[in-house]
Amino acid sequence: MFKPKVPQKEIKYEELRIYTDEELRNPTDEEMKNFKIKHDIPLLEQLESGPWPSYVADLKVEAWRRRRLADDRMMIPRDVVEDLLGQVELSFVHGETHWKHGGIVGVIGYGGGVIGRYSDLPDKFPGIAHFHTIRVNQPASKFYKTDFLRAICDLWEFRGSGILNLHGSTGDLVFLGTTTEQLEPIFQEMAHHLSQDLGGSGSNLRTPECCVGRARCEYACYDTQDVCYELTMHYQDELHRPAFPYKFKFKFSGCPNDCVASIARADLSVIGIWRDKIRIDQDAVRAYIKGDLIPNAGAHRGRDWGKFDIQKEVIDLCPTKCMRLEGEELYIDDENCVRCMHCINVMPRALRPGTDTGACILVGGKAPILEGAQLSMVLVPFMKLEPPYDNLKELIDKIWEIWMEEGKNRERLGELIQRMGLWRFLDAIGLPPAPQMVWHPRTNPYIFWKEEDVPGGFKRDINDYRSRHAR
Ligand code: HEM
Ligand code: SF4
Ligand code: SF4
């Protein structure tokens, strides 16, 4: 059960409604057929065909809705959506963007959260002369109630374009397109009436994100939502006021399936894991073998893959070959299991993660710029995760201390570790090296030694050497 960390005031959603249902209703097919936006968009209109939900069709509906609203029912131009479609059409023609470079806007007290943006054709498309994006910190795992979403949508229709991105790749609920004047009112409305804060942008802690975790998944090895929420609240200052050499992201997955792709998209990836044995229900194993239970919970039902063959589909695919069948008993040599999740994924009714659970902490994930893409690498093979997660906070604080001090301007943590070398980084945060940190030992012999570890040190006298070895 979710327990907020700060006192929550009751949100009176009904009083927050701005529009009536009639004002926001959807058009009939007939009404849409007769509706034409102010620009010709033949290229975009091709994207209304086909089975996938069309963003062009959706934007047209929104344009239709704004045409119907009374003049005093919108704080930014009525035709913001139509001008957006017009400019995108032109970008399709030119094969070029028509947004100006950069844009620095925000709200008082914060150094991030809003991405400023201006059209480079403001005379042609005045409705999007300003088209700023606001990042709104989403609830962990993105569970919503409709009355919250209605209140958010009303506010955004009134003070913005009505266009949302559900959600940004980092996790935020994204408001797409408003003017500078509306930023502060939107922020104040959200903070005072919806207990809703902005997300992160800039050289700071970005909005943390987690998988669905214990809310709806049997594999979750820790409460991803609770950690995500706790750390978001604990590091509010780092999130709202950029103090870092560059951006920094947290992501939390409950197991190695890594449903938020934390290993690829976070500087700090927290991935659930267990230390004890996989729990085996032998009756359920037999039910899978017999065909009474469907492998992978039916994920491959779209095609006939033949009768389930536990040897072929599980045992032979185990990456460490640590499973075996004796009669109809399944054995796992857990010492050699690398917790890849494969067997559990195939037979979720028979196999479960152990009960001594926690997380593996990995660091350094990033996209290619500058020094090449990196997946996060193991820093702490196993850490218990229990509220208030002081052990994790302590590790994060140490990482930040060294990165904030040593990191070059716009150097991600992964690049700092490459530049310093893992051993210096481990030294700096006081962690001992562990074999789990490397895929294989180094192949080259360019090994640095610390002077104190070398008998006699590094200061040598050449004459002493010559006394034994003549020139
Ligand atoms: C007056 C005598 C020598 C001179 C002027 C000399 C000069 C150099 C220079 C300029 C390099 C390139 C260094 C670099 O990569 O930046 C080099 C590399 C090398 N030298 Fe010499 N060298 C001499 C004698 C020797 C001797 C006697 C040996 C072996 C017994 C040797 C073995 C090597 C090796 C193995 C490398 C490659 C090192 C690497 O891979 O980085 N050199 N030498
Ligand atoms: S990462 Fe693991 S725990 Fe989280 S939702 Fe995916 S399968 Fe479940
Ligand atoms: S989790 Fe992976 S490594 Fe472990 S027993 Fe199952 S298949 Fe093998």
Image (tube, rainbow, N blue to C red):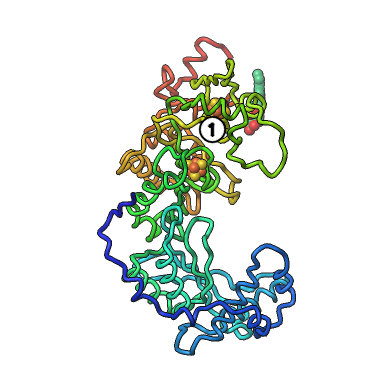
Q: In this view, does 390 lie to the left or right of 102?
A: left
Judge whether residue 199 can be spotted in this image.
no
- Location of the C terminus (image quadrant): top right
Q: Is residue 252 left or right of residue 96?
A: left
Q: Position of residue 351 (x, y in %)?
A: 51, 30
For this rendering, which residue is in front, 147 or 74?
147
Q: Where is residue 19 in the image (x, y as percent from the top left)?
A: 43, 80
Q: Is mark 1 on a helix, strand or loop?
A: helix
Q: What residue type is labelled 1?
A: Ile
Q: Where is residue 14 in the image (x, y as percent from the top left)?
A: 35, 74
For image coordinates 52% across by 84% down, the residue present is 77
Above or below, comparing residue 81 to residue 238 in the picture: below
For image coordinates 51% across by 25% down, the residue present is 283
Q: In which quarter of the image is residue 206?
A: bottom left
Q: Where is residue 127 in the image (x, y as percent from the top left)?
A: 56, 82
Q: Does the residue labelled 1 lie within 8 Å of ligand 3?
A: yes
Residue furthest to the left: 7
* Mark 1 lies on residue: 344
Residue furthest to the bottom: 71
